[in-house]
Amino acid sequence: MELSKKRLLVTGGGGFVGSHLVDELLSKNNEVVVADNFSEGQRDWVDDRATVVETDLTDSKAVHSVVDSEFDAVFHLASHSDPNDDDPRRQFRTNTTMTHELLHAAHKSGIKRFAYTSSSTVYGEAPRPTPEDYAPLEPISVYGASKLADEGLLSTYAHSHGFTVWNFRFANVVGPRLRGAVIPDFIEKLREDPETLTILGDGRQEKSYLHVDDCIEAMCYAIKNYNQSHSSGSNKMHTYNLGTTTTTSVNRIAEIVSDVLNVAPEFVYTGGDRGWVGDVPRMRLSVEKLAEIGWKPQLESETAVRKATEELINEVDYK
């Protein structure tokens, strides 16, 4: 599908990845409507050229009032992602309800194209690099479980209701507007105390980090070129890993952030091999499927981390 001169709905368009996607879609002369409650994003991250509808996407009437037959596709990025939510049942219910309501409204409106941002967390602690067809999928967090449940709903609408679905499983995405993640956490801590940096876990956690520019480019490229993929044909569910071929440890991220801030703190560890309950300590996705249709990231993991750090410390509105 060519992503130009279309009318597109982006849920979560005020969030980190969502706002960057909106920027890209607008640059291609699309008409973009953003639906968001801004609980995990910011209104001022949304380009003024987009139409903004502030709404609760778990409310059936609200969703049906936003979704209409004039949309060419839905990009569903809205998600409750806090791993430390004190009510994990609410997190699961919120994520799955939003997805089901949007799919139902799209079906009723005759919209057949649906892009979804899933997560590497659906794999749980899988062998690395992890391909898209790895099984069994055994997430170890409620967030990962909600993403896997959403994928089940997407598959249902793809195979039973004629949808074409693009399902993107993200590695750790970094870049401008990122909040609530390891890089901004380290920046904030070191600004408060440049002498000591507390690191969750043992610092040996090692994962792929993908710059948000590469992430957006990969999504758009896959949507445009999916017919070249071996997943085309009768299969309506097109799942792609988005990541890098390399990984970066938390210790190395701490070193990079310290270097960019020109400080030399002592590292202090909370202990254990995980940063939090449900944290997957090591993750690297296979990105061969995207490579087969001609896409690869411009920045590998460590370079992406350094660039994101430099961008985040220069954001004038960053606190």
Image (tube, rainbow, N blue to C red):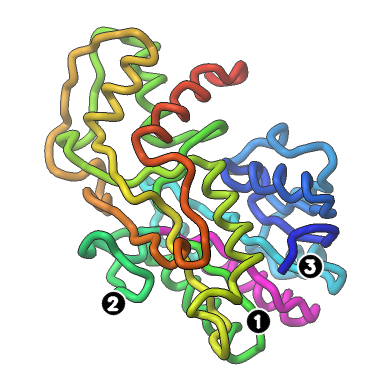
Q: Tell me the tag on residue 135.
A: 2
Residue segment shown in magenta: 96-119
Residue 307, position as x, y percentages in the image? 46, 28
Q: Are marks 1 and 2 in contact (CB under 8 Å)?
A: no
Number of other residues with Cα within 10 Å of mark 1, as a class: few under 14, some 14 to 19, many 20 or more: many
Separation (CA) of disc 1 from disc 3: 15 Å
- Nearer the observer: mark 1 or 3; the answer is 1
Give the side of residue 230 with respect to residue 52, left or right: left
- Tell me which label, 1 or 2, sits earlier in the chain: 2
In the rendered image, residue 109 lying in the magenta stretch gets the answer yes
How many marks the image carries: the answer is 3
Nearer the N terminus, badge 1 or badge 3? 3
Instruction: Identify the residue shown where x is 43% and y is 62%.
Output: 241
Q: Nearer the viewer, mark 2 or mark 3?
A: 2
Identify the disc placed on residue 163.
1
Q: Are marks 1 and 3 in contact (CB under 8 Å)?
A: no
Q: What residue is drawn where x is 72% and y is 81%?
A: 107
Earlier sequence position, callout 2 versus callout 3: 3
* Separation (CA) of disc 2 from disc 3: 34 Å
Residue type, label 2: Ala
